[in-house]
Image (cartoon, rainbow, N blue to C red):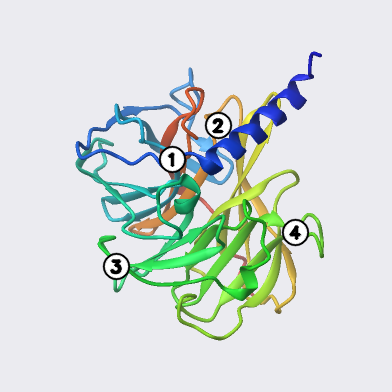
Amino acid sequence: MRLPISLALSVIASLTVAASDQQSRPVLGSEPRMRAVPVAIQPGDPQRRHVGALTYLGGVRLTSPDPAFGGFSAMRVEGDAFTLLSDGGNIVRFRMGTDFKPFDIVFGDLPAGPGTGWKKRHRDSESLAWDPATGKVWVGFENRNAIWRYDRDFVAAERQARPAAMARWDRGGGPESMVRLRSGRFVVISESSDPRGRPDARFLLVFAGDPTETRLPPKRFGYVPPADYDPTDVAELPDGRLLVLNRRFSVPGLFTAKLTLVDLREAAPGAVVTGVELATLERPLLHDNFEALALTREGAETILWIASDDNGEVWEQSLLLKFRLDLPEPAKTP
């Protein structure tokens, strides 16, 4: 029987997930080879720069002959130093200046994590948060709904926890997004919805401190992404508001992404919040499985870095894109 294309893709996707859940984990080799090819935000129109509230500043497609390369689901950017974390526990670190040419490239692997590490599901690392003062890094793992803390250079794991508030999250819809706020609190957002509450809302938790240490229960909120989208990463703006990266897969559009602005500053625990849409990455613009978001400052400008997870597929790419965020000045109270 011939299946409709949408159903066929769904079947293929489900089989792929089931297979990848049990497959052995590919690990990056000892020879760090990576190439960066410049890309325009709109193929065929190198003059295109503006995307909603974003101004495109440049970007690259990253490739490597190493078969384990790719799958980037989270990242850290500190000055010209980049850390890309894959959803299989692989780490790619490099430096890159304004010429978008990476150097000092290092391949690595998480030193520890849930399970033995032999299977991909044991290192399903989907989110990353870090403390600029100490360099400590926190990684959120799907499948186990766990958070692990590592030292600055990922030499050793220091602590780990499986927060009770995350215990009943779907195995494949766990801590997809995480950020450490400047206050020391942590925001964690699930990829899957809450079947007991609003079906369009995702779990959003605010931990009072390090989630691997604090015994205080997190404050619970709900986040409603744009229709048919799932949150994939989150970052904090200088004024305390949050930027959330959201992704959708559809036929025939394949992957598209939306960036939303979320304000939790005055929200009471239990509130369900939505975001203001700032930009959409869809045809004819570059569109892919964008999962990683990082925010930096260059003088007075707010800079966004967005990276994609190629899922190990030839029809997807490992993109690293740079934007300036152009938000209007808030209205002054008379």
Q: Residue 287 carries which label?
A: 2
Identify residue type, mark 1. Ser
- Marks 4,1: beta carbons within 8 A: no
Earlier sequence position, callout 2 versus callout 4: 4
Earlier sequence position, callout 1 versus callout 3: 1
- Marks 2,4: beta carbons within 8 A: no
Earlier sequence position, callout 4 versus callout 1: 1
Identify residue type, mark 4. Ala
User: Closer to us: mark 3 or mark 2?
Assistant: 3
Q: Residue 201 carries which label?
A: 4
- Residue at 60% in and 58% down: 174
Label 1 CA crowd tier, 10 Å (few <14, some 14–19, many 20+): some
Earlier sequence position, callout 4 versus callout 3: 3
Q: Name the residue under label 3.
A: 151
Q: Distance between the residues labelled 3 and 2?
A: 34 Å
Element at label 2:
loop
Q: In which quarter of the image is the N terminus?
A: top right
Q: Quick check: 97 left or right of 222?
A: left
On the image, the x and y values in percent for residue 59 come to 38, 35
Identify residue type, mark 3. Asp
- Marks 4,3: beta carbons within 8 A: no
On the image, the x and y values in percent for residue 145 come to 56, 62
Q: In this view, does 185 lie above or below 130?
A: below
Q: Quadrant of residue 261?
A: bottom right
On the image, the x and y values in percent for residue 286 come to 52, 29
Q: Quadrant of the C terminus?
A: bottom right
Q: How far apart are marks 1 and 2 (CA)?
A: 29 Å
User: Closer to us: mark 2 or mark 4?
Assistant: 4
Q: How far apart are marks 1 and 3 (CA)?
A: 26 Å
Q: Which of 79 and 225 is in front in this view?
A: 225
Q: Is residue 153 above or below residue 30?
A: below
